[in-house]
Image (tube, rainbow, N blue to C red):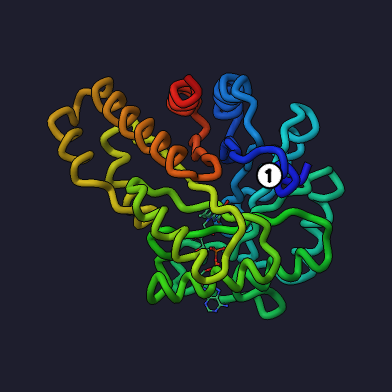
Amino acid sequence: MKIIDLFKTQPRTYSFEFFPPKDEIAAVDFGINTGQLLKLTPSFVSVTYGAGGSTQERTFALVDFLQNKIGLNTMAHYTCVNADREKVTADIANLTKIGIENLMLMRGDPPKGEGAFVPHPNGFGNASELIAFAKQNFDICAGGAAYPEKHPEAVSLDADLSNLKKKVDAGVDFLLTQLFFVNNHYFNFVRAAQLKGISCRIIPGIIPITSFSQIKRFGAMSGAEVPEELVNQMKPYEYDNAKIYQIGMDYAIRQCRDLLIMGAPGIHFYTLNKSRATVEIFETLLK
Ligand SMILES: Cc1cc2nc3c(=O)[nH]c(=O)nc-3n(C[C@H](O)[C@H](O)[C@H](O)COP(=O)(O)OP(=O)(O)OC[C@H]3O[C@@H](n4cnc5c(N)ncnc54)[C@H](O)[C@@H]3O)c2cc1C
């Protein structure tokens, strides 16, 4: 089912993001963890597309499995890095042929070691161009990426929002956000997007911090502000994994609860293919 159609009956959606397991052992681990998560009956699940299309085969195999063998409403992430129009057409045709109606369409990052993003000569320069092309040629529901603390390449949040409006005008049906830890960034962003004329759902993307090393890593990876209060709370327990986990969970639960109370249209969980934290948050929220 198209996610946009789910919205007609679900004022809030709860979704889980996975990445394709890299080998057989990771696949077994994935099976155990997703088994726990699927009991929570998510509105939809999504599968990432490795940088520069590096996981294309595994992404497509996993979306096929989740959609057709497990029966989950599944969205494939897809980027136009190194892809010309023929490849994009063939890839989306393959996905729609196996019943994938939902695509998270992004420009993608330049391959590691390369500086700025360089579009394929017969490809697309940004997500809006890809989305416009895909929506004109296929009957799909398209998600797009949004950045409450601005995309790293954008000169300002306002410029990024103007580009986001182009994405919505190109036909995007909903937006999923980059991870963030400070809810005010999300709420300010949603208000600013609305002022730009963006009215589709902007679903917050949340990742719980469950180990001390993640604090720096997640912040650096996403450009998200990690609140000093959280760092200070965790610092004395740097080597106490259980305590760090508990502090991270308490924070994530408060963050999700606040988002929902303040009217967010659901939550997209970056699960990192693990189940424990997401299950705990989900069950606590629904109590
Ligand atoms: C929820 C989520 C899931 C993701 N999943 C994946 C994944 O599975 N695989 C992966 O490789 N990456 C993924 N990414 C990362 C994403 O590919 C990168 O952040 C990438 O750098 C930008 O992609 P985009 O679609 O947001 O690009 P765009 O929307 O094209 O924006 C990129 C930059 O260009 C600017 N821009 C956009 N349009 C224009 C225009 N018309 N004129 C001038 N400037 C413009 C924007 O302001 C921004 O700075 C994900 C990101 C998010 C938030």
Q: What residue lies at 72% left-to-right and 78% top-to-bottom?
A: 122
Q: In which quadrant is the N terminus drawn? A: top right
From the viewer's perspective, is 55 left or right of 242? right
Judge by depth and name the residue closer to the eye, 287 or 46: 287
Q: Give, as a three-letter code, the residue at label 1.
A: Phe
Judge by depth and name the residue closer to the eye, 9 or 230: 9
Element marked by disc 1: loop
Q: Position of residue 109 (x, y in %)?
A: 51, 63
Q: Position of residue 90 (x, y in %)?
A: 81, 60
Judge by depth and name the residue closer to the eye, 216 or 12: 12
Q: What residue lies at 57% left-to-right and 71% top-to-bottom?
A: 165
Q: What residue lies at 79% left-to-right and 49% top-to-bottom?
A: 95
From the viewer's perspective, is 272 left or right of 144? left
Can you tell which quarter of the image residue 207 is in? top left
Q: On screen, 73 above or below 274?
A: below
Q: Position of residue 172 (x, y in %)?
A: 67, 61
Residue bearing the label numbered 1: 7
Neighbourhood count class around disc 1 (C-alpha, 10 Å): few under 14, some 14–19, many 20 upward: some
Residue furthest left as drawn: 236
Residue 218 can be seen in this image: no
Q: On screen, 223 above or below 25?
A: below
Can you tell which quarter of the image residue 32 is in? top right
